[in-house]
Amino acid sequence: MSQRGNPIGEVILSVEGVSLAFGGVRALTDVSFEVREHEVRAIIGPNGAGKSSMLNVINGVYHPQQGTIRFLGQTYHDMDPHETALAGIARTFQNLALFKGMSVLENILTGRNLRMRANLLLQALRAGPALREEIEHRERVEHIIDFLEIQPWRKTPVGRLPYGLQKRVDLARALAMEPRVLLLDEPMAGMNLEEKQDMCRFILDVNDHFGTTIVLIEHDMGVVMDISDRVVVLDYGKKIGDGTPHEVRASQAVIDAYLGVSH
């Protein structure tokens, strides 16, 4: 049972024996862990521990030399990010990849591209099924805009928004893909305290309202301990801890490798 009252389900995503190297540098070594449906699963570790590499393996940016990703009962070896998104895994990035000259609404609509069935000609003509589909997509996007409280900026170019709001738009665009699993790469990096509190609330609300499973990388240990159901700890590309926030916080290996350094 989740700490928020959502029932934690069966395993939805498994990382199985993943190893990744770039030349002679080993980024990940035989890493395995699982993610259960509806939970908030954190990945933590010092800089260079392999956290972002792990997310890149899960969503198909990197292909590991060993190991597999198992999602919804199917095993994947060499999926690319497009195929991963179609399967139901969405991703936000530590360095924002938004279209700065486009409005908030336009940016979020790009997240619906995978869900559009009408061909480009019908979309351009806004005719028949394409028009009905566009209306459906816009309704979905407007719901997300309201949900994340970015209505006042829906027509504002994203490049004019404060950093915290840009992060929220990035989250909205990922949600527009209707993912089963949402990967968040340091969603609170560079934020002030108030922005972090808002983002924490929205992440938990997404988990509750949409039932979305969350996998997140985050350096703020207070945030990790407050919002996560379970935590996996990496150090130099190896898994050194896995359990509830309380279990991980009490682990001497984790204290030595990470918490002790940070605090």
Image (spheres, rainbow, N blue to C red):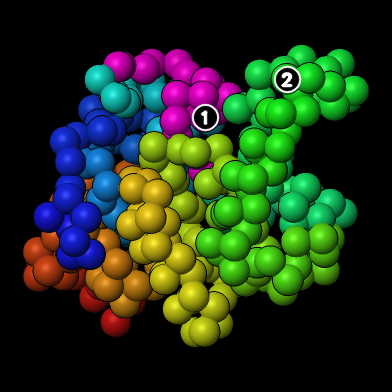
- Residue under the point 45% across and 16% down: 78
Of the numbered discs in the image, which one, if any, rests on residue 129?
2
Q: Which residues are magenta?
A: 74-91
User: At numbered mark 2, what does the secondary structure look like: helix, strand or loop?
Assistant: helix
- Distance, label 2 to label 1, CA atoms, is 24 Å
**Quick check: can you spot residue 157?**
yes
CB under 8 Å between callouts 2 and 1? no
- Residue under the point 29% across and 67% down: 227
Q: Position of residue 130 (x, y in %)?
A: 75, 23
182 in relation to 196, above or below = above
Q: Nearer the viewer, residue 218 or 129?
A: 129
Q: The N terminus appears in which quarter of the rendering? A: bottom left
Q: Position of residue 142 (x, y in %)?
A: 65, 53
First in sequence: mark 2 or mark 1? 1
- In the image, is 43 to the left or to the right of 165? left
Q: Nearer the viewer, residue 247 or 180?
A: 180
- In the image, is 209 to the left or to the right of 235? right
Residue found at the very far right of the displayed protein: 125
User: At numbered mark 1, what does the secondary structure look like: helix, strand or loop?
Assistant: helix
- Residue under the point 34% across and 48% down: 211
